[in-house]
Image (cartoon, rainbow, N blue to C red):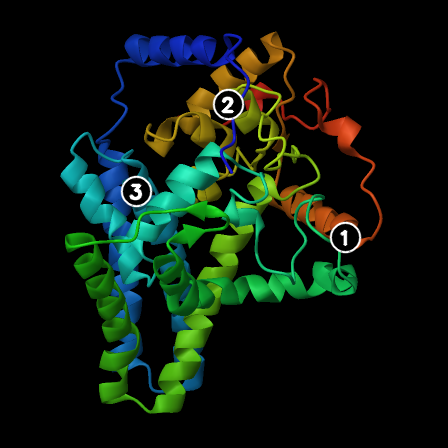
Amino acid sequence: MRVRFASSEGFYRQLKERVDAYFRRTGFSRHDSPRMYAKAAILLTWLVTTYVLLMFVASTWWQAVPLAILLGFAVAGIGFNLGHDGAHGSISGFSFVNGVLARTFDLMGASSYIWHFKHNVLHHSYPNIIGADEDIDAGPMARLSPHQPHYWIHRFQFIYLWILYGFLLIKWQFYDDYRCVACARIAAQPIPRPKGWQLVSFVLGKGAFLTWTLALPLMLHSVWDVVLLYLLTSFTSGVTLSVVFQLAHATESAAFPEVTAERPRCEQEWAVHQVLTTVDFARSNRLLNWYLGGLNFQVEHHLFPHIAHIHYPALARIVEAVCAEYDLRYVAHPTLAQALAAHHRWLLRMGRPGPWTGAAEWTGVAGMGKTEELSQVGAP
Ligand SMILES: [Zn+2]
């Protein structure tokens, strides 16, 4: 399916002009911020420290369990900040640096080659479009869009999906990537099969992941200990990664335009589609602003994925102001708890059978009344 967007009516051009003016006025660089490199050092130190403590120091379950959970959060943090941003080329002006940091995904067991197509190409081009965006296609157990078929089990998805989210990273590590390579396809979209160096890199990445997560620990510890702690670490990373991505798109505040092979045209221009299908959350939370790598500013991320995420709080003011001028709905859930509640309500709503009657609410009108005060947005 080749999705087409309506031609531009000037929204994105206006946004880019304001953002360019912001960088000219402040003199900030879009990349290579010392804050980003300090963050990379902290996250990698966090990962190595918890791993070494687990391998060589922990001798009881009450030492190993919290360390495995901390290791899981470190892996998710590296995914948010280094893998994701490196893959977008937003950390450095040097593509080599971005390329190396993007490879942290391979260390997590998720191929950076497949991620490029799955996330950068398909998700960022076509968020919330069935058949193109695999982020809202979590298999038959999950109904995340009103355009997916309803099964009886979806009535209970508001309970079990939170647990299944924890297993998505494991599925990704051991099944999804291999299926994508074997079928040369992500969702309904064809992708090129890795060849030559790309294939070598894919295999080396999977090998490196299996070595540090399973092979090395098995040399020192029992199979049960290694498997259980691997599952706990991966569950922690999986639920953290999945929930953060879901809070931005699979929520009652996001739009789900119906685009099919027969009607492959979106009614809005690309940038407007990004705003309508995406939601910010907890923009004033300093801890989340640091840890989530700008993914709580997903509206800004979808509009400017090549700019380092440390600038997103400042860009949010610009994006919100331009959206208001264009009478375009812009939603930011003020807190993490409110974003979680909105996702929970969406799972409940999608769990009910019958036609979805709320579509008229999400056509891009302004004044949804869920946007924070601009003054609450944190300083860059
Ligand atoms: Zn992204």
Q: Position of residue 24 (x, y in %)?
A: 29, 9
Tell me which residue sits at (65%, 63%) in the image: 141
Q: Is residue 17 above or below residue 308?
A: above
Q: Report the disc number at residue 311.
A: none
What is the spatial separation of the Cα atoms under label 3 and label 2, in whole angstroms? 21 Å
Specify the quadrant of the image occupied by residue 62. Answer: bottom left
Q: Which residue is mark 3?
A: 87
Q: Is residue 318 above or below residue 93?
A: above
What is the spatial separation of the Cα atoms under label 1 and label 2, in whole angstroms? 29 Å
For the residue labelled by badge 2, is the local secondary structure a helix, a strand or a loop?
A: helix
Q: Report the disc number at residue 270.
A: 2
What is the spatial separation of the Cα atoms under label 3 and label 1, in whole angstroms? 34 Å
For the residue labelled by badge 1, is the local secondary structure a helix, a strand or a loop?
A: helix
Q: Is residue 289 visible?
A: no
Specify the quadrant of the image occupied by residue 151. Answer: bottom right
Q: Residues within 10 Å of mark 1 (few under 14, many from 20)?
A: some
Q: Identify the image quadrant of the C terminus.
A: top left
Q: Position of residue 253 (x, y in %)?
A: 68, 35
Q: Earlier in the sequence, mark 1 or mark 2?
A: 2
Q: Residues within 10 Å of mark 3 (few under 14, many from 20)?
A: many
Q: Residues within 10 Å of mark 2 (few under 14, many from 20)?
A: some
Specify the amino acid type for callout 2.
Trp
Specify the amino acid type for callout 3.
Ala
Q: Which residue is mark 1?
A: 348
Q: Is residue 253 left or right of residue 27?
A: right
Tell me which residue sits at (59%, 25%) in the image: 266
Mark nearer the viewer, 1 or 2: 2
For ligand 1, tell me if the residue under mark 3 lies within 8 Å: yes
Q: Is residue 102 left or right of residue 174?
A: left
